[in-house]
Amino acid sequence: MSSQTSTGNITRPLGSLRRVRLRGHLTALGAIHVRQRAKRRAVGNAHGATWLRRAWLWFSRYANSIAAVSSVVTMISLLYGVFTYTVLEAGPRREAELKTEIAAAWQTLNSGLGQGGNAGRIDALETLNRYNISLAGVTVTDAFLFRLNLPGADLERANFKGADLRSVVFEGAYLMEANFEGAILLAANFKDARLSGANFRGAMMEYSNLENAKIDRADLRGAWVGASNFQGTVLFQTCVEGVSFADARNLTSEQVSETVGISTPCRPVPSP
């Protein structure tokens, strides 16, 4: 005889009630399991997304680091190239350029021999003097060398015969035995120049500055020296035959007394 329970007007067997309750418990457990599985799936997805974000951040930082290192390497390479070009190679490169420039200057002077005009010879002469190249024996006869600037130049035995040398600067230059015969030397600057044995025959030297110049044993026969400055000029044994010093400035009688050709005859001076 099965057990029964009564609730109000409904009477159920006790075993049936237990089965109903068991199914309810199982259903509740199943729902809990489903929710837990869904939660684990959600947590797993969240962990996966977090890992991807971390991986992307790491990659981005790594890529930025690579870019930064690449930029530094590029900059170092650029700086090394500049250093090599401007420092390590500067000496040999400048030396080669200097040799080329000097050779070109000499070529200009040689190609202009016997020609009038300038033909680039002013630049050539000044370039060579700027690099302290001796110009001894250079020939620029009949050339147009207006305002030529050669202070301190070595021009021993240089030949300027018939050249236009107006307003030139030979201050402190070495011009021993140089030839200025028939040259135009208006307002020329020979201050402190050494002109021993130089030839100025027939040269036009008005308004020239000969202050402290050494023109000993030189030849000034027939030269025009009006209004030139002779302050401190050495004229020992210089031939001044036919020269008028009437307008010369700062010329003393003592300086004139050292010359020849006025009261004493000039000794023969060979033409260069």
Image (cartoon, rainbow, N blue to C red):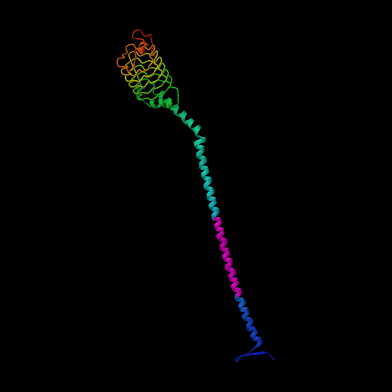
Residue situated in front as seen by the camera: 86 or 216: 216
Residue for point 46% across, 29% down: 98
Residue for point 54% across, 53% down: 63
- In the rendered image, residue 43 lying in the magenta stretch gets the answer yes
Residue 235: horizontal and vertical position, in percent?
38, 14
Residue 124: horizontal and vertical position, in percent?
41, 26
Q: Is residue 254 left or right of residue 85?
A: left
Residue situated in front as seen by the camera: 114 or 258: 258
Q: Quadrant of residue 204?
A: top left
Residue situated in front as seen by the camera: 8 or 117: 8
Residue for point 56% across, 62% down: 50
Residue 207: horizontal and vertical position, in percent?
32, 20
Main secondary-structure element of the magenta-colored stretch = helix
Q: Is residue 64 left or right of residue 156?
A: right
**From the viewer's perspective, is residue 53 above or below residue 161?**
below
- Which corner quadrant holds the N terminus? bottom right
- In the rendered image, residue 215 lying in the magenta stretch gets the answer no
Q: Is residue 40 left or right of residue 243?
A: right
**Which stretch is magenta?**
32-59
Residue for point 49% across, 36% down: 86
Residue 183: horizontal and vertical position, in percent?
34, 19
